[in-house]
Amino acid sequence: MMEFVLFLGLFFALGGLAVASNPSPYYGVVGLVVAAIAGGGWLVSLGVSFVSLMLVMVYLGGMLVVFVYSVSLAADPYPETWTDWGVVGYGFGMGLVVMVGLVVSGVFGLLTDVGTVNGAGLLSVRVDFSGAAVLYSEGAGFLLIGGWGLLLTLFVVLE
Amino acid sequence: MSHLHLSFYSAFILSSLGLAFHRTHLISALLCLESMMLSMYVALAMWPIQMQSPSSTIIPIIMLTFSACEAGTGLALLVASTRTHGSDYLHNFNLLRC
């Protein structure tokens, strides 16, 4: 079970690498989808399922769908996949830089474990559900400012 | 540092490198920006877990809202570029070149 969580973390970083090596945008979106699903599964494994559900619905189901049909504006006649030499060079170079940086800074000797959150006892309250409820009670200012920002963005996009 | 922190830290660094070394398309730079926002969301969502403070849950939600605004603005720029130049190639943005 522990290995599954480690694999999710690995797929998150590999999805980031797949986007960063800048293939043709059709394949970059695939990397972003893999990273979003791995991140969502990871948050579920830590216990905060509300935040994970928000990620999947808003990010994956909202923003990435819009990105996918905007990618049609960027059509290449010969799309570059991850097996073309330019993309492989970029991906390998970036991966190498990050790995060298991690090894030199000595991070791999300092790795610890992380705990989960679920509440305890019979009258337990989940952390993320009660936290999101704060958004509607004491955090109403955040809600209003966020709504105002979204309205302004609508005018920016329409212009 | 736990392996979770390591994972989204390296994803953020890789995405920012991908944004810096962009190649031909504007939309692939926007995808790298989205990947940076994703890793920041997961990082901020770790805060209520590790500090056991429920009120910090609204921070990743608000950040996701504004990241959606930014993605919409970036896509509007992409559409504007396609309308004027016919494609979203980055070498078309050469008005400020000396």
Image (tube, coloured by chain):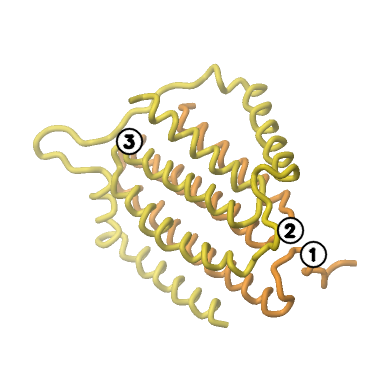
Chain colours: A yellow, B orange
Amino acid on which the number 2 mark rests in the picture: Thr
Proximity of marks 2 and 1: CB atoms separated by less than 8 Å: yes
Query: Mark 2 and mark 1: span between their CA atoms?
Result: 7 Å
Screen quadrant of the N terminus of chain A: top left
Furthest residue toward bottom: A159
Amino acid on which the number 3 mark rests in the picture: Ser
Residue corresponding to mark 3:
A45
For the residue pair A107 and A34, the one nearer the viewer reads as A34
Tag 2 secondary structure = loop
* Residue A81 place in picture, x, y as percent: 65, 48
Proximity of marks 2 and 3: CB atoms separated by less than 8 Å: no
Q: Is residue B75 left or right of residue B42?
A: right
Q: Residue at x 36, y 70 (%)?
A: A144
Q: Residue at x 70, y 58 (%)?
A: A78
Residue corresponding to mark 1:
B91
Residue corresponding to mark 2:
B24
Q: Chain of mark 1?
A: B
Image quadrant of residue A93?
top right
Query: Mark 3 and mark 1: span between their CA atoms?
Result: 44 Å
Image quadrant of residue B17?
top right
Amino acid on which the number 1 mark rests in the picture: His
Crowding near the residue tagged with mark 2, few <14, some 14–19, many ≥20 C-alpha atoms within 10 Å: some
Marks counted in the figure total 3
Tag 1 secondary structure = helix
Looking at the picture, does residue A123 appear above or below residue B64?
A: above
Query: Mark 2 and mark 3: span between their CA atoms?
Result: 38 Å
Q: Chain of mark 3?
A: A
